[in-house]
Image (cartoon, rainbow, N blue to C red):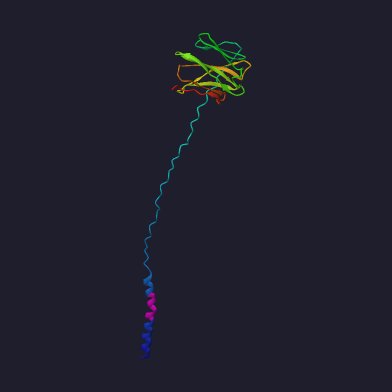
Amino acid sequence: MKKYLLAAAGVVAAAVIAAPSAVGASSEPPTDPTPAPALHPTPVPALHQTATPALHPTPAPAAPAPARIRTVRSGERVDAGQGFTVWLTEDGKHWAGPDGFENFRSVVDGNIDRSQPGVSHQSEGDASGVFHSGLYYGTRTAGRVELTDGEGHKTVATLVALKGHPDWGVWYAHTAPSEDSQAVALYDRGGRLLADLPGFRKP
């Protein structure tokens, strides 16, 4: 009787010992022998930046070249065109029109200040055209005298100076007839404005 019980106990013990092995074996997941496919990242398209063209500023227009100043002797007559004559003396500017009538503007009577740049203007004419003339003074670097009409049209004057007197001279020009007054500007040889007389438009 004892021998049977011991044998039965051995069977039970063997069953208890074997049970954990069976449980442990069933908890492992089955191994899949097929390898997982490799992951290939989706390529990102390259960003192409468009170059912005460089901005090149438009250069400012160059100033007109300075006028050549004609140097004359005292009393030397200059043909100013269309029947007009101009001459210079120590005391100022002289001119005459087709009618022969002589005119004069002094540079020594105190009416102009030769210590600073300035310009004067006289004009006469008819339906065929207008003769403009005047003095420029107070500078040894006169470059040009320019007339501008009411519509913006410009006329560059001719310059005449008396030998030995570089700080003043005479200018003259011809324009078409107009009811508007011409503006007059004096520039130095570098194109800098030295003095001006405003024009006006007839209402």
Provide the major secondary structure of the magenta segment.
helix
Quarter of the figure with the N terminus: bottom left
In percent of the image, x 37 and y 74: which residue is there?
A: 23
Across and down, in percent, residue 84 comes to 52, 11
Depth check: give the residue in front, 191 or 201: 201
Q: Residue furthest top?
A: 100
Asked whether residue 150 is drawn in magenta, I would say no
Depth check: give the residue in front, 56 or 186: 186
Tell me if residue 79 comes above or below residue 167 in the rendering.
Answer: above
Number of numbered tags placed on the structure image: 0
Depth check: give the residue in front, 35 or 168: 168
Tell me if residue 100 comes above or below residue 40 in the rendering.
Answer: above
Tell me if residue 58 comes above or below residue 123 in the rendering.
Answer: below
Across and down, in percent, residue 121 comes to 53, 19
Quarter of the figure with the C terminus: top left
Region rendered in magenta: 14-21
Depth check: give the residue in front, 199 or 157: 199
In percent of the image, x 39 and y 76: which residue is there?
A: 20
- Is residue 160 found left or right of 149 in the rendered image? right
Q: Residue furthest right?
A: 164
Across and down, in percent, residue 6 comes to 38, 87
Across and down, in percent, residue 55 comes to 47, 35
Asked whether residue 17 is drawn in magenta, I would say yes
